[in-house]
Structures are given as C-alpha cells and as structure tokens.
Amino acid sequence: MGPNKPRVVLLLLVLSIVSTVYGRVNEQDEDLVSSKKILHGGTVGAAQNAARYLIKNGGTRAYNGLNIYDTAYKTAKGDPKWFARIDYATAKNPVTHLNVNKAITGLRDPHIKISGMTARAAGLTGGALNVVQKVAPIAMAASMVYDAVEVLDDWGRGNGKLAAKKSVTKTGQYFGASYGASGGAAYGTAIFPGIGTLIGGIIGGIGGGLLGGAGGEALANLFI
C-alpha cells in the first residue's frame, strides 16, 4: 500500500458517511435532521481544533505523556509551542501532574495533580481526538459542498425563497458553531487544559451550531 493510499481511503470513507447522512436528511426525518445539525456543529468544532492544536503522545523525556501543542505560538525555530503536557510520576517528582505553558497562558504553571488513571484516560482520549482532528477538515469540506449544492439545487428549481432561507440558516449554523467552539474551548481549558480545551471546542461547536442555526432560521422566516 502506497504512502498516500490510507489518506485516499479515509477521504472516501468520510465522503461516504457525509453523503449518507445528508442524503437521508432530504427525506425530512426529524431524527436525521437533528443528527445532521449535531454532526455539523461537532465537525466545525473539531476542524477548528485541528487548525490550531496538535496532539502527540510522549515528549523529549521518558516521563512525558500526552502533549498538546498550540500552533498559534511558535518557538524561535518556528515550531509550535507546547500548551499542556502530562508528566508521569518519577522518583524525583512522585506526583503525576498536568503542566500548562506560562508562555501561552501568561500564568504560572499550576502543576495540577492528577491520578495515574486520569493521565492514562487523557492519553486514550487524546489518541481518539487525534483521529477526529484528521477526519474533521475533510468532513467539514464535504459538508460545505453538500450545503452549497442543496442551495443551488433549490435556486435551479426556481425556489429562490427557500434557497435564501437555507442560506441564512446555514450561515447562522457555521458562525454559531465557530463562536461556540471558541467559547467551549476556553471553558474546557479552565476545567482541564489540553484535553478539556479540545473536548470543549467540540461541545461548544455543537451547541453554538444549534443556536446559530435556530437563530438564522428565525431571521429567515421573519424577513424572507
């Protein structure tokens, strides 16, 4: 298998899933419509995470665990700075703890004490989120294409009013999900820097997308 073949297979799989969900939504199944909205918001949140954060297991020292890097902050060499890192207990420091980079937060590293079980769970969660972040940009691009095709199809059928309403609603969903993801990431950071940041971004994207879509739909119904 060539080096690019796994990426092609992943792309086709994601497109197939998105196509199936969006295709069935056209049948006006309320459960599927809700699933689409949740998928959309979560995808925006995950894609936003992927654009900024990198997830790696391990570091330069043997006791380093999960590392979250923030691409918005660079070292002198141009590499992303670490944002949050788990260090496992050692003979010199017998406490497993979470480090947060002062260079990013502006606050002193709190060295948050966590259990070994929490550290391992964070590592597993980080691995899962790493996969999600690789898939999210593809899924988001596919989602945007399907949304555009749906609106253009309505225009082509001569239903300009419906197309305009859908455009406003979908725009509200995207902006709502984006703002929600940013807020969720900030809230998640306050709870558990790193993993909490990423999970908060996804949850915030879902909530923001739902609210933004509802707001956009209300405006569309009011003015169009």
Image (cartoon, grey):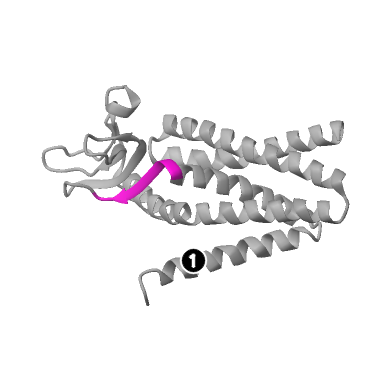
Point out the residue furthest to the top here: 107
Query: Can the viewer see residue 67?
Result: yes
For the N terminus, which image quadrant? bottom left
- The one nearer the camera, 48 or 192, is 48
**Could you tell whether 15 is left or right of 213 in the image?**
left
Residue with the most extreme left position: 92
Residue plotted at (50% across, 42% down): 48
Picture coordinates of residue 114 (x, y %)?
31, 38
Instruction: Determine whether 198 is above or below 146 in the image.
Output: above
Where is residue 207 drawn, in percent x and y? 62, 38
Q: Residue at x 77, y 45 (%)?
A: 166
Residue lying farthest to the bottom in this orientation: 1
| Span highlighted in magenta in the image | 51-58
- Is 209 rendered above or below residue 28? above
Quadrant of the frame with the C terminus: top right
50 left or right of 29 in image: left
Question: Mark 1 Cα within 10 Å, few/some/many (few <14, many 20+)?
Answer: some
What's under tag 1, amino acid-wise? Leu
Residue drawn at point x = 71 percent, y = 39 percent: 213
